[in-house]
């Protein structure tokens, strides 16, 4: 991957994780009166509250999902190098299209958090306090790991050259549209895993790291993704069952 692409992408990932670590530190070190707390009633949410939660989820999606784009982005950069007239910055436009999908998904996550706070299923510290919610999310995520649609989306993510051969479009707009297309398929692969954050605590750094690692390993070619998906799906199902009892 060209250094011109690796540096800004690595900087974005580091900045996103730095923001999340700082927010997690605030929640454990600051007095509750000094922190922003989500309103407990649906009607009390203001535009600023929605904007803050949306930004938090958008940064979280960038931190957790940008590392998983590296295999595809490396293949994209090699494909671009075949044409000396192609700009080395096209990879950033591709990454921008990919990230735009996950930022759009953050709108749904924000709406869910608003609903869960209104139902008192999340604490003011954004921790889960409804065991049936946690069980439902984990069981759904576990079952989804075994579905053909999950496997089809994962196969797309693990075969970057095949995607580039069939979906290639020239220019900046083409790179952005390819990023959106890849991001949409990646969303189809990993959306249920992102919802697990509602079960383990929205700002749970350990949960973020483990889900990021799982998503990355599923897309890493040397790993048997089918076996890994089945193993993780089984663990989610068992974990969900524990929440029920």
Image (cartoon, rainbow, N blue to C red):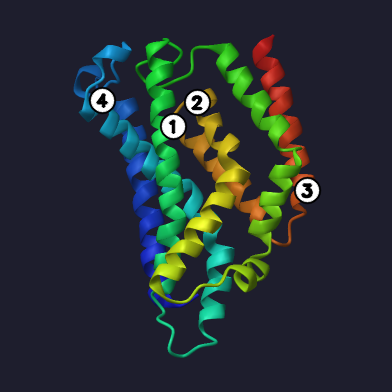
Please state if 29 lies on the left or on the right of 2 as rendered: left
Can you tell which of label 2 and label 4 is closer to the viewer?
A: 2
Q: Quadrant of residue 86?
A: bottom left
Q: Are marks 3 and 1 in contact (CB under 8 Å)?
A: no
- The disc label shown at residue 226, or none: 3
Question: Does dot 2 land on a helix, a strand or a loop?
Answer: helix
Judge the density around disc 2: few (<14), some (14-19), many (≥20) Cα neighbours within 10 Å: many
- The disc label shown at residue 198, or none: 2
Please state if 9 lies on the left or on the right of 37 as rendered: right
Q: Which residue is mark 4?
A: 30
Q: Is residue 16 visible?
A: yes
Of the two numbered discs 4 and 1 on the same chain, state the one appearing first in sequence. Answer: 4
Above/below status of 97 relative to 198: below
Task: Work out how far the residue at label 2 is from the one at label 4, CA to CA, in angstroms.
Answer: 22 Å
Q: Residue at x 54, y 23 (%)?
A: 199
Can you tell which of label 3 and label 4 is closer to the viewer?
A: 3
Q: Residue at x 43, y 33 (%)?
A: 108
Task: Work out how far the residue at label 3 is from the one at label 4, CA to CA, in angstroms.
Answer: 43 Å
**Residue 27's spot in the image, x, y percent?**
33, 27
Question: Does dot 4 land on a helix, a strand or a loop?
Answer: loop
**Residue 12's spot in the image, x, y percent?**
36, 57
Task: Work out how far the residue at label 2 is from the one at label 3, CA to CA, in angstroms.
Answer: 25 Å
Q: Which residue is mark 1?
A: 109
**Residue 212's spot in the image, x, y percent?**
55, 45
């Amino acid at each position: 991957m060209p250094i011109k692409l690796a540096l800004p992408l690595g900087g974005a990932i580091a900045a996103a994780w730095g923001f999340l670590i700082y927010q997690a530190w605030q929640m454990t070190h600051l007095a509750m009166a000094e922190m922003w707390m989500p309103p407990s009633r649906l009607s009390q949410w203001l535009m600023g509250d929605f904007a803050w939660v949306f930004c938090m989820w958008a940064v979280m999606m960038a931190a957790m999902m940008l590392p998983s784009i590296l295999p595809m982005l490396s293949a994209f950069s090699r494909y671009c190098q075949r044409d000396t007239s192609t700009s080395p910055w096209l990879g950033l436009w591709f990454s921008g299209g990919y990230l735009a999908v996950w930022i759009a998904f953050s709108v749904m996550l924000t709406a869910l958090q608003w609903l869960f706070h209104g139902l008192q299923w999340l604490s003011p510290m954004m921790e889960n306090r409804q065991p049936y919610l946690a069980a439902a999310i984990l069981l759904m995520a576990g079952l989804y790991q075994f579905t053909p649609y999950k496997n089809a989306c994962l196969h797309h993510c693990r075969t970057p050259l095949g995607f580039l051969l069939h979906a290639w479009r020239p220019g900046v707009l083409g790179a952005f549209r390819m990023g959106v297309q890849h991001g949409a398929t990646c969303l189809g692969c990993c959306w249920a895993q992102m919802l697990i954050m509602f079960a383990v605590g929205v700002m749970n750094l350990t949960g973020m790291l483990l889900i990021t690692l799982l998503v990355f390993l599923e897309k890493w070619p040397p790993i048997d993704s089918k076996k890994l998906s089945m193993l993780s799906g089984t663990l989610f199902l068992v974990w969900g069952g524990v929440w029920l009892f």
